[in-house]
Image (tube, helix red, strand yellow):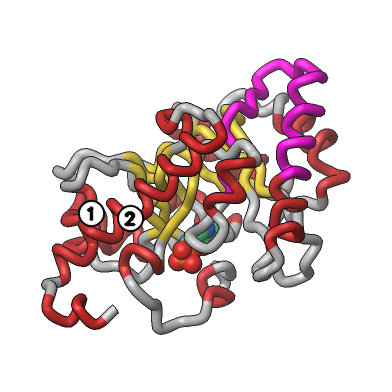
Amino acid sequence: MLYKLFMNEKDIIIENISTICRRIENTCHRIGRNPKEVKLLLATKTVSAEKIKIALETGTTLIGENKVQEIKEKYECLKDTPHTKHFIGHLQTNKVKELLKFGVSCIQSLDRLDLAEKLQQRLESDDKSIEAFIQVNTSYEESKFGLDPSEVLAFSKQVSQLNRIKIKGLMTIGLFSADTEKVRKCFRLLKEIQQKIIAENIPNIEVNELSMGMSGDLETAVEEGTTIIRVGTAIFGQRIYPDSYYWNEQK
Ligand SMILES: *Cc1c(COP(=O)(O)O)cnc(C)c1O
């Protein structure tokens, strides 16, 4: 938008956050949900610690990072600004030890047993525990990480044995499509999986949180029961790298 040329970076971030919050609130009101049930997570990959600080001053306190290296680089600058940090990227097993040093409270991208076992092992030796969401590939795209929907229940039972990992929810990246109904299908599937897991009453497994919906599809996600919307670009602007770069920790 042209008028943004005359605004400074800080005002743009603040305005963008308020626009997203308004969209969440409007959708909640339309369908009779309490807006307090839906949290906004700032997806801060590539965003400088200074900009993140500006965003945190608006009262939004939840951020999500995709790379261990970036968390490490921003740690000093952010450590005195109150916030909650989730990990939302693909996590390589050999980065677990490093990740646990930087105050991440939840790993939203738990998607395989060897990763869960490595986490359990590290957490035991650090005498810590951590919250995690199970990431599900609801769009069945090869390019996306996450468990196949058919594997999630069995995986939950396996992870329930790992007492240092506290499962609190499910996460998915919906299909990138302008077809709202196709996107909705992904979110409905995540909700169905949530209901199945709840019905099984597995010890040490809670799945109250559903992390689904981004800037393009947040209204649909709110309608389908999301509790965490993850937004980056619509708040901080375009990134110079393609998303595939950030969904692959190997790089
Ligand atoms: C980057 C990212 C987002 C936010 O995407 P935008 O298009 O920047 O809003 C959400 N979820 C995950 C897992 C991401 O990596």
Q: Amino acid at mark 1?
A: Ala
> Residue 8: image x %, image y %?
11, 72
Name the residue carrying label 2: 19
Is residue 84 found left or right of 52 in the rendered image?
right
Name the residue carrying label 1: 55
Between 31 and 171, which is closer to the camera in this rendering?
Answer: 31
Residue drawn at the location 65% of the way across and 19% of the way down: 204
> Residue 179: image x %, image y %?
71, 66
* Location of residue 69 (image quadrant): bottom left
Considering the image in quadrants, where does the N terminus appear?
Answer: bottom left
> In the drawing, what numbered circle is on residue 155?
none
Q: Is residue 112 magenta?
A: no
Q: Is residue 198 magenta?
A: yes
Between 223 and 247, which is closer to the camera in this rendering?
Answer: 223
Q: Amino acid at mark 2?
A: Thr
Q: Does the residue tagged 2 have its C-beta within 8 Å of any atom of ligand 1?
A: no
Residue drawn at the location 80% of the way across and 19% of the way down: 199
Q: Is residue 132 above or below residue 64?
A: above
> Which stretch is magenta?
188-212
* Location of residue 244 (image quadrant): bottom right
Which of marks 2 and 1 precedes in the sequence? 2
